[in-house]
Amino acid sequence: MENQRKAPIGRPRGFDADEALERAVHVFWEQGYEGASLTDLTNAMGITRTSMYAAFGNKEELFRKALDRYTEGPASYAARALQEATAREVATAFLNGSVRASTRPGCPTGCLGVQGALAVGEPGRGARDTLSAWRDEAVSCLRHRFQQAVDEGDLPPDTDPGLLARYLMTVGNGIAVQAAGGAGRDDLQRVADMALRNWPPA
């Protein structure tokens, strides 16, 4: 009897957890945290609620896992941009990446990290706070990179790295919102190019 009780623990889940999580990303991306019901999520993931809870936790935990996957996938352009050689190249890669990620064929438009939980009720506050921290972390990373650029003489000494980081994030977030509203890639690329024309000279 003891062995019979333990046997189910070693059984395979019967579904591809990575594929299921990828599908959850798309549901949250398209419908937002509150708009994505458990039924929407489990139907898209091809699993039962019991399997979802066992593999990913509750809805908020699933959302956090989905955001991590989104960060490593469609939003990975942000981390790559920080590795560019100059501040201008960082900004260019960041905004161009925002345009591409927000208008990716076969994916929802916009950005999961921007519109996933901007306006939510009490049940969605955890998700809203998670996304707020996610965006703040991106600003912080950009600020540190631009401070490095100031220290190295790549940006003028009177540059405010924090303000420059916030400016870039604001334009990037705006691109995502415009994409979600139907703006096309070419138009948004022109917006990115225009923003970069205001970049401070070295």
Image: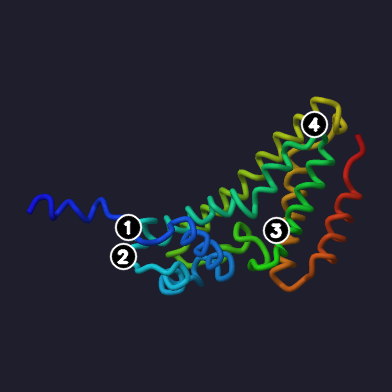
Amino acid residing under circle 2: Thr
| Left or right relative to 86: residue 34 | left
Q: Could you say whether the residue bearing mark 1 is in a helix, strand or loop? A: helix
Q: How far is mark 4 from mark 3, CA to CA?
A: 26 Å
Figure quadrant of residue 13 = bottom left
Please say if the residues under marks 4 and 2 sit with CB atoms less than 8 Å apart.
no
Residue 155 horizontal/vertical position (percent)? 85, 33
CA distance separating discs 1 and 2: 6 Å
Secondary structure of residue under mark 2 = helix
Residue under pointer 1: 54
Instruction: Report the Cα–Cα distance between label 4 and label 2.
Output: 50 Å
Secondary structure beneath label 4: helix
* Residue 200 tag number: none
Residue 101 marker:
3
Q: Which residue is mark 4?
A: 149
Report the front residue among 57 and 191.
57
Task: Calculate the distance from the C-alpha at mark 1 to the C-alpha at mark 3.
Answer: 31 Å
**Image side of residue 84 versus residue 75, left or right:** right
Does the residue at mark 4 contact the one at mark 1 (Cβ under 8 Å)? no
Query: Which amino acid type is marked by label 3?
Result: Ala
Q: Quadrant of the N terminus?
A: bottom left
N-terminal of the pair, mark 4 or mark 2, is 2
**Image position of 149 with respect to 40: above or below:** above
Q: Earlier in the sequence, mark 4 or mark 3?
A: 3
Q: x%, y% of residue 175?
A: 75, 61
Nearer-N-terminus badge (1/3): 1
Mark 3 falls on what kind of element? helix
Q: In this rendering, which labeled residue sits more in front, label 4 or label 2?
A: 2
Which residue, given by chain and number where applicable, does mark 2 sit on?
50
What's the residue at 69%, 46% (across, down)? 78
